[in-house]
Image: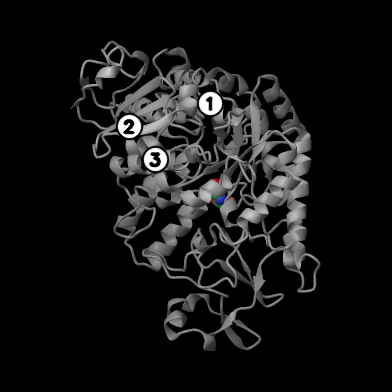
Amino acid sequence: MKKTWWKEAVVYQIYPRSFCDSNGDGIGDLPGIESKLDYLKELGIDVIWLSPVYRSPNDDNGYDISDYEDIMEEFGTMADFDRLLKKAHEKGIKIVMDLVVNHSSDEHAWFMESRKDKENAKRDYYIWRKGRPLSTVSKEEQERFAGDIVEYQGEKLLPPNNWGSFFSGPAWVFDEKTGEFYLHLFSKKQPDLNWENEIVRKEVFDMMTRWCEKGIDGFRMDVISLISKPEGLPSTEIPKGAVYGDGAVCANGPRVHEFLQEMNQKVLSKYDLMTVGETAGVTLEEAKKYANEAQTELNMVFQFEHVSMDENPKYGFKWNTGRMPLVPLKKNLEKWQLGLKDVAWNSIYLCNHDQPRVIARLGDDGGQYRERSAKCIATFLHMMQGTPYIYQGEELSMGNYPFTDPSQFRDLESINAYEELTEKLHISPEELFPMIAHKSRDNARTPMQWNSEKEAGFTTGTPWISVNPNYTTVNAEEQLKRPDSVFHYYQKLIALRHSSELIVYGDFHLLLPEDPDLFVYERTLGEKKLLVVCNVSENERDFAIPEEFNAGKLLIHNVEGEDAKRGHLLPYEAFVLEI
Ligand code: NOJ
């Protein structure tokens, strides 16, 4: 396996809206990030992944971009960006930009042209189709989608196929002006770009080149696995727990690898970048193509199987209140560790801006083991193979927000799902609310907790989304002062990775696969070996380490003053031995 800097790096994701507000408008911004570079330096990370900072009407908090080459007003100016990049580089920190090109905003100049008339030069930048006359669809479909029927020039029409948007409702919007529908796999304000059009690809590649010329260090590519749509855009089966057909049918489409190889040849291969594809719906076989060692497409994938282990068995959707079950989680992580060995590279993560806080899914959020469980989870994650991603606040054990009412949701996915599932699938609000509260993306988006002052030191104004009330105890200032804090534990995990080829490149071997509490594995590289032991539960457990590790060196341990080798584990105890 080839050694590269991005395999050895640790990434820190910043969600700019919620990171640090420098001007009191309640919204995080670029100067705010700049003011926290020393904090990140102290943590020890190598790369910042910056969620979108481009101009956007913010239907989906910046993932709906109206100008790829300008900065969102609330976040600052291009001069602020240039200064941030320069300052980060001076401190040895790289910046990877979010690249959102499966779709743009409907307020992007391209789309505004595209929707003007069918002959417009930019019409084909997006995916426009005629509707289906009611006479051509089954009675069942007519009834099921009655609310989506539109009337145009005396004819009743249903959308071109049955696909649903990932944010509820149909994946199509009817545009009266030209009498056609446009496709949006995400919100109505996120029309999908037409990658079949080579002019669109050229526009995207040229824009990427201009960012590279500015000196950025890479791209995290939003839902890049969805850019090539299946031929004919066929209707699909409607999955359990859904109203519409599954737009995920677009994952790993027929031309996606061709498009990425073209991107690689025309842009990526010319610079020293880190590239990560957010690849929803990726399988092992597909990942081997996206992130192949020969580097003809991207450096690594960011996949979702392991964070989908707590899906709701009753309804078959993500909304649930249950814990993430450890056995399937371990087996899934093992599958990816072994499956990509020597052939492709993976990202390892449990938190990001789309996931609830991991401590609420697998640890003891709000309980007596909050800190120990956060360290335990971090241990099993950071000792695996792949490039680790830390999401802002994870290094402090930030938890889920205690939602009490749907009016507190800010995220369109949560708001729309609540409406659609109560109204169309008739799930009672009493049953649904706790599930959405537990899994909502808003849990990740509450402001970063810097100190115990007003609004956790995030803003001097009113934050755009409420601060988690636990900020008086969970905050950076307190943890920086305390040597046994979660922050300092993360600092140590990062330093260990930086000092060990075994941690970066070693082979993975899972022990006790069926144990519901213990996550135990070995890593090996040449003669060297690592034993990672994590009790991911509230149970006390006996565990005798394999004999060969009796003389092992203790690299890290989340319980002070106990002998790691004593044959017993406290709740959420974790340690790593090396021989
Ligand atoms: C994936 C992003 O991570 C998510 O936040 C966003 O809503 C969708 N893609 C659409 O861009």
On screen, residue 507 versus residue 98, left or right, reads: left
Q: Nearer the viewer, mark 3 or mark 1?
A: 3
Q: Furthest-front residue in view?
A: 526
Quadrant of the image occupied by residue 115: bottom right
Q: CA distance from mark 3 to mark 2?
A: 26 Å
Disc on the earlier residue, 3 or 1: 3
Name the residue located 47 percent from the left edge and 59 percent from the top edge. Answer: 416
Residue 27 appears in the rendering: no
Q: CA distance from mark 3 to mark 1?
A: 37 Å
Name the residue located 37 percent from the left edge and 25 percent from the top edge. Answer: 375
Identify which amino acid the numbered label 1 is placed on. Gly
Q: Nearer the viewer, mark 1 or mark 2?
A: 2
Identify which amino acid the numbered label 3 is placed on. Leu
| Disc 1, SS | helix
| Disc 2, SS | loop
Q: Is residue 477 above or below residue 127?
A: above
- Residue at image mark 3: 333
- Residue at image mark 2: 366
- Within 10 Å of disc 2 (Cα), the crowding (few <14, some 14-19, many 20+) is some
Q: Nearer the viewer, mark 3 or mark 2?
A: 3
Q: Is residue 48 above or below residue 498?
A: below
In front of the other: 27 or 382: 382
On screen, residue 32 versus residue 385, left or right, reads: right
- Residue at image mark 1: 457
Q: Position of residue 41 (x, y in %)?
A: 58, 20
Disc on the earlier residue, 3 or 2: 3
Label 1 close to label 2 by CB (< 8 Å): no
